[in-house]
Amino acid sequence: MMRVAWAAAAALLIGIGAAAAQTYPAKPVRVLNAFPPGGATDVVGRVVTEHLTKALGQPFVLEAKPGAAGNLAGEALVNAPADGYTLYLVAPAVAVVNHAMYKDMPFDPAKDFAPITLLAKLPFLIEVSTKHPFTTYRDFIAFAKTTKQPLNHGSPGIGTAPHLAAELLKMREGFKSEHIPYRGTGPFGQGMMQKELDWSFDVPSSALSLSQGGFVRLVAITSNAPDPRFPGVPTLESLGMADAAWVSWFALVAKTGTPRPIIDLIAKEVANAYKNPEMASRLTNVGLNPVATTPEETAKIFEADRARWSAVVRANNIKVE
């Protein structure tokens, strides 16, 4: 009798979810963005929400909700109903890192977020200030391991992807360098331009601009294959470092408990968006690689990155109060 009851309950839930998907969306959908307008997430968000609005017949409204490294937007998501009418355009910080850095987070992304799909990926580049003579990655590492003078590196803030990638490189290669956190991408870029920093990890759009301006030299990239935008820049893996295809990404998540047919519908429509070359080019034009994944693939990426970057956070005792 218990088995029959459980089977009946499961069938009822599936039926409710299917019915919800058939009428979804029946009203506007909020898509939370933890970053101010004008950045890369804003570009991704607008491409995706414009397509979903046209494809599904209701407005998908991008809503900026910055603060606490994405935690404010995350809290807004988990406090909303699990009905698919509040989504979150999330970056690795809040999805896989913050839970290891913040002492009192009001939610657990591993339990409270339902992955839908990745939206875009971007590799990192290792840039070295032109105040140094290095032209290759190996020259830079040899100097970093033997120099008596203190080195420093920067990032847009504590716990950001460039910060954690730099800490992982230091652990792998065995050298010391002091992290200088800036308040955002703009001030960080100014720090590189003014030669306040010796080296850093950076995203493609910023690294390209700094390189073309003569402020940095690009000595390695973390993609799993050479990037045509950066001819002559070797991958870390080609330089002998295993498991070094470190990338950042943007993804779409819902609240756990959202009916699976709704999640599948959104994932399918994002994949459809990227079949349009014009849509995809809007991302590649700003240095992003458009990518769509299934909910299961997205969950595996979250899990792998959570393990990698949480270990870096713990090993370096990185905390944000």
Image: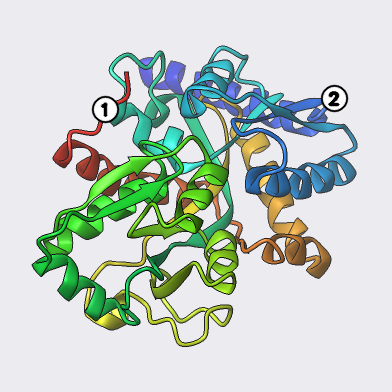
For the residue pair 56 and 19, the one nearer the viewer reads as 56
In this rendering, the count of numbered labels is: 2
Task: Tell me: 35 left or right of 42.
Answer: left
Quarter of the image where one finds residue 121: bottom right
In the image, which disc is placed on residue 319?
1
For the residue pair 162 and 120, the one nearer the viewer reads as 162
Image quarter where the N terminus lies is top left
Residue 147 place in picture, x, y as percent: 12, 66
Residue that mark 2 sits on? 26
Mark yes or no: residue 24 visible: yes
For the residue pair 124 and 273, the one nearer the viewer reads as 124
Q: Is residue 31 above or below residue 77?
A: below
Distance, label 2 to label 1, CA atoms, is 42 Å
Image quarter where the C terminus lies is top left
Task: Tell me: 187 left or right of 282.
Answer: left
Who's the residue at 41% across and 42% down the image?
A: 160
Q: Residues within 10 Å of mark 1 (few under 14, many from 20)?
A: some
Who's the residue at 43% across and 70% down the image?
A: 223
Residue 285 place in picture, x, y as percent: 72, 66
Residue 95 place in picture, x, y as percent: 44, 36
Q: Is residue 321 above or below residue 177?
A: above
Tag 2's secondary structure?
loop
